[in-house]
Image (tube, helix red, strand yellow):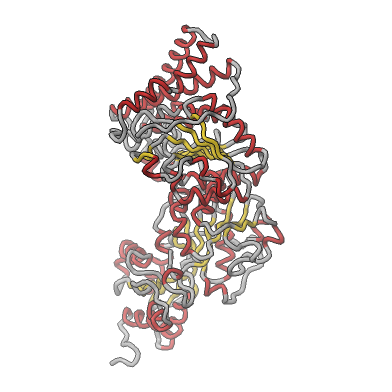
Amino acid sequence: MAEEMRRDPDVFLMGEEVGQYQGAYKISQGLLDEFGPKRVVDTPITEMGFTGLACGAAFTGLKPIVEFMTFNFSLQAIDHILNSAAKTRYMSGGQLSCPIVFRGPNGAAARVGAQHSQDFSSWYAHCPGLKVVAPWSAADAKGLLKAAIRDPNPVVVLENELLYGQTFDVPDDPDFVLPFGQAEIVQSGRDITLVAWSRMVQVALDAAQTLKAEGIEAEVINLRSLRPLDIDTLVTSVQKTNRILTVEEGWPVAGLAAEIAAQIVERAFDWLDAPPSRVCGADVPLPYAANLEQLALPQPATVAAAARALCNRPSEGGA
Amino acid sequence: MAVKPRQPDPATPATPPPEELLRLYRSMLLIRRFEEKAGQLYGMGQINGFCHLYIGQEAVVTGMQAMAGPTDSCITSYRDHGHMLACGLDPKGVMAELTGRSGGYSRGKGGSMHMFSRDHRFYGGHGIVGAQVPLGIGLGFAHQYRGDGGVAHVYLGDGAVNQGQVYESFNMAALWKLPVVFVIENNLYAMGTASARHAAGDELCARGAAYGIPGERIDGMNVLSVRSAAARALAYARAGAGPFILEMMTYRYRGHSMSDPAKYRSKEEVSEMRDNHDPIDRLRQILQSQNVIDEAGLKEIDRTIKASVAAAADFAQTSPEPAASELWTDVLSEA
């Protein structure tokens, strides 16, 4: 963010506690000192208001970055994200663009209960006029956020609170930009394709590790971009592995995994040796109790079990 | 319900010079004739969907725009045709948008409620009641960010003032002293619900009091009162003192939209406003009593405006529909 704010004076950050508090999750640490209160704007707790304000400013050509303390609170502002940001370019016949970034932590954190633990991937990926990305590694976070800030369209950047605490290598290049719509093959394999994004990439990698010990080589794909979706990379992978399993933190009904399954069936039906499948978050509001929370979210063991079933391998300890 | 009595203006409106009086007259008459034609085209099936006419309220946007500065911006809700004409948009492009043709401002993809012109700093045309208010303070934020001296004119109806986001906007606009004038067009009905049935408290201009935003209630059927109030409010906002609220007491003669028979008010109430408070009649009387223009001159204005509206209607019916390929364009900007 700091690099992009140095690069373009029209870029500014606004949200709750982004300035003097240095960010609820310290993402904006140091920005107020460097750029001052004009460009690092502490807002009242008023999501609908400041999201609308930022969209209005973006209509004039400014490039706001709106931080939601968590994406759960974006529900207060979703009217502006869809009706003001996503649709205005189309409704104006191409006259008015809305170059804006909506970012913040998305999905389940740890033990914060149902209202603070929801995955909005499929919600925003549903809507034309938006671009949606979900970084996993720190390099993803840098490259995708820079691409989002430089993009002339509204972009939703779904970060993850649990990933904020993990360490990855980051390229130093201030122009390290990852293109939208390109998935990353994190690990190559020939037996099954595991598709995931955000924190679920780690879950898929852990499952792949278990599977490897059993002789199943999984190809793990980090989707990175949810809209546009890099279906070509998935199709190519399925042509090699003939099986695909999507790991989605969010609810299964009308989710992104369902969309991926539909597109794979449309595009690669003849290559499939098993139905396209998915491991999703349980179809319940997220519980608080530690054991129930763990049961509600995809775990490496459940992903490995689903992969084994698709590969017609007996389950661990089974007959 | 009876029409609320209007308070006298705090300041007597200064009478503008003759050429300005004529400009105001032409602007209001253009809106009136344009909207009448839009109503006709709707009846003929040339315009469809929602169509909200501004007839009766012409003095509000006309008086405000008369005092607009060169960098000021404007945003409103879905009752937007009058605002576009007052901002200088071409009647042909507006009417062709109403008919959903390629010659429309949004090339037929927006319709009556969703029109924009960046060249005229007109930022819509928004269909969600109240949503234009935070968007509008965003325009004010941009004026302040760039230091361009502009003020955002943010229009909302008496129905929109009950939306929570309006108060979120009042708070931020006052907190950051954004250059914004909120123009509440109080036409006494939020669709079919009279003010007394939806709004607690007497004066909507006082709704900003908790945030320290000054407000005035203005006779919105008198374009000269509107004009002088606009001058005060815009000067206040432009000087960096923060937002200002103008509550314009006005009246729409037609239903909320073309599909509203307006059975929630009496014919007598409408006739009283139309016959005794009409903003165009009132200004015509001033023009005549001050000998600004004679009968022949008025007829000439009438003729010119009718011709321009007829040309707009003709264009709107002959401009081709958007090409099928337009379905897929303008969703995203090319990076």
The reply, left or right, for residue B71 in relation to residue A211 is right
Res. A4 image quadrant? bottom right
> How many marks on residues?
0
The reply, left or right, for residue B285 in relation to residue B231 is left
Q: Residue at x 34, y 79 (%)?
A: A306
Q: Residue at x 43, y 13 (%)?
A: B303
Locate residue B89, reporting x and y percent. 50, 29
Q: Is residue A92 visible?
A: no
Q: Is residue B225 above or below residue B158?
A: above
Residue at the right extreme, as displayed: A34
Q: Quadrant of the N terminus of chain A?
A: bottom right
Q: Residue at x 57, y 30 (%)?
A: B10
Q: Quadrant of the C terminus of chain A?
A: bottom left
Locate residue B103, reporting x and y percent. 42, 31
Q: Nearer the viewer, residue A99 or A32?
A: A32
Q: Residue at x 64, y 37 (%)?
A: B236
Locate residue A283, reporting x and y percent. 33, 72
Q: Is residue A243 above or below residue B162?
A: below
Q: Is residue A278 visible?
A: yes
Locate residue B151, reporting x and y percent. 60, 38
Q: Nearer the viewer, residue B112 or A252?
A: B112
Q: Is residue B182 above or below residue A303?
A: above
Q: Nearer the viewer, residue A84 or B17?
A: B17
